[in-house]
Amino acid sequence: MCDDMCDNIAGALRGEAAGQRQVPRTHHPPVGAFPGFDPFQLTTQLSRHGRLLASRPIDSETQMAEQELTQEQVDDLVESKSFAVLLLVSAIVGLVVSVGSWAFLELTAQLQTWIFVDAPSGLGFGSPPVWWPLPVLFLAGLITAFAIARLPGRGGHVPAHGLAAGGLPVIRNLLGVLLAAVASIGLGLVLGPEAPLLALGGGLALLTLRLSRREPPPQVTVLVAVVGTFTAMTTLFGSPVLAAVIVVEVAAIGGPRLRLVLLPGLLGAGVGTLVTLGYGSWEGLSTSDYAITALSLPAFPRPGPADFGWTIALAVVIAAVAQLLMHGGLRTERLAKPRPFLVLPIVGVVVAALAITFDQVTDEGVNQVLFDGQAQLPGLVSSADSWSLGALALLLLCKGVAYSISLGSFRGGPTFPALFLGAAAGIMASHLPGFSLSPAVAVGIGAATVAILRLPWTAVLLTSFLTASAGSGTVPLVVVGVAVAYIATIAVNRWLTARVGGNADTPADAPPTITA
């Protein structure tokens, strides 16, 4: 749902708006719940200085150069009164979206606990019976299918397309998006919360903007929706910096225009963090159920020649496997799209069967295969020595297949299962001679992230955060691994598309876009 927003802000901020006229203001006095905020004045200034609303494509590099904002133009806009009021609106939006995002993340986390822990106990089982995931994931398939087939918006973004496709948030679609996401994530499918969270962030931002009691111009709508995505990602990852990197990299924003997006986005996200950090004597809302923390890894002072060799090999293998999983998701989508009430319950049962099989063979629990892996990742890494190569191989097989078919049928995000699978692959690779646990896990996470999302900057930053306990010695390996995996991803995707078919809407070498 956030694709058009990001495409508009990316394309228009690149200058795809030649000849934009100033919008007359004579018929639009200041209105709304924000005193002194005249969105049409902001539109006029954005059109005059930034030409933010795209009207026609650029057909030459000369035209692009002519339409680029100068630093002086951006300075004039940033110093304007309307931009200052936009920052105030961004702060309000940040608070609203933070509360909504926290509620969504808490709901899905609590639902997982209630369904898989509390409900079996309440029904008299000492522990969840072996068959328990089967009816739960079957029900998840029915609920998600209902949201897709019967509610507006078809449940939102299909995660098999990465963090891509969709449109500017449509408020009437939010119910279907949230129902599909809660059923998919809360009932145990192998998907994360980031894509529906982006939809929620953009939708809540636009709902807040509607307090002005007048239809806002497109420029203001786009900017405020961007603030919502900044804030939603900040609530999930706990860092406005990481949220900014993701949004900026997805939208491919650069040059002087970058500040026009960064300032409102960072301000809204920063103010929104007060909801969970607290303010004064108020301790804020708890994030313990979904907080992302750094992994516990041994210190790694510096890499050697063997580390770089194994890094390249591991990155290539992970990129190839990741593309196989993504293409499996696209094929599942083709089956699920015309008949969701048949395919989704079957997929749910297959995922449950994979989790049960893994548990029966390894006695490691169904939770290792179910869910997005965010909660299980720290334990997996900290107990790496207790995992046999056979158990790790079966984990990668079962969770990989479950992830692939979940991508094309249910609704959620692709990021966190990729992190988990990358870490598991890294733990396996740490058994190679001369390749220790810390660099192997770091390279595995970075390579898997970029292979699925195709966001190199995000992959490096997120991996550096997760593996910070290992020290700076892993950083060169992560950068090399991400670069190699990114190139390999493009090559493998093109090879697969040419031989077995693929989705032309998401070529590997196309810039990805945020959506939900």
Image (tube, grey):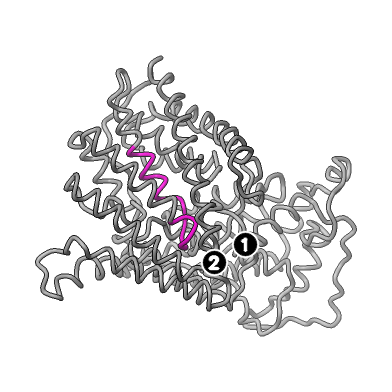
**Neighbourhood count class around disc 2 (C-alpha, 10 Å): few under 14, some 14–19, many 20 upward:** many
Q: Is residue 76 visible?
A: yes
Residue 479 vs residue 23, the one in the foreground: 479
Q: Secondary structure at mark 2?
A: loop
> Label 2, label 1: how many angstroms apart (C-alpha)?
8 Å
Q: Marks 1 and 2: in contact by CB < 8 Å?
A: yes
Picture coordinates of residue 195 (x, y %)?
Answer: 50, 60
Q: Where does label 1 land, which residue?
A: 166
Classify residue 72 as left or right of residue 190: right
Q: Residue at x 24, y 35 (%)?
A: 390
Chain-order first, disc 2 or disc 1: 2
Q: Residue furthest top?
A: 305
Whether residue 199 is situated above or below residue 467 in the rendered picture? below
Q: Residue at x 35, y 57 (%)?
A: 350
Q: Tell me the quadrant of the picture where the N terminus can be found.
A: bottom right
Classify residue 205 as left or right of residue 74: left
Q: Where does label 2 land, which residue?
A: 156
Q: Tell me the quadrant of the picture where the C terminus can be found.
A: bottom right
Residue 265 vs residue 437, the one in the foreground: 437
Classify residue 168 as left or right of residue 516: right
Q: Residue at x 60, y 62 (%)?
A: 2
- Disc 2 marks a residue whose amino acid type is Gly
Picture coordinates of residue 275 (x, y %)?
Answer: 40, 67
**Range of residues picked out in magenta:** 406-424
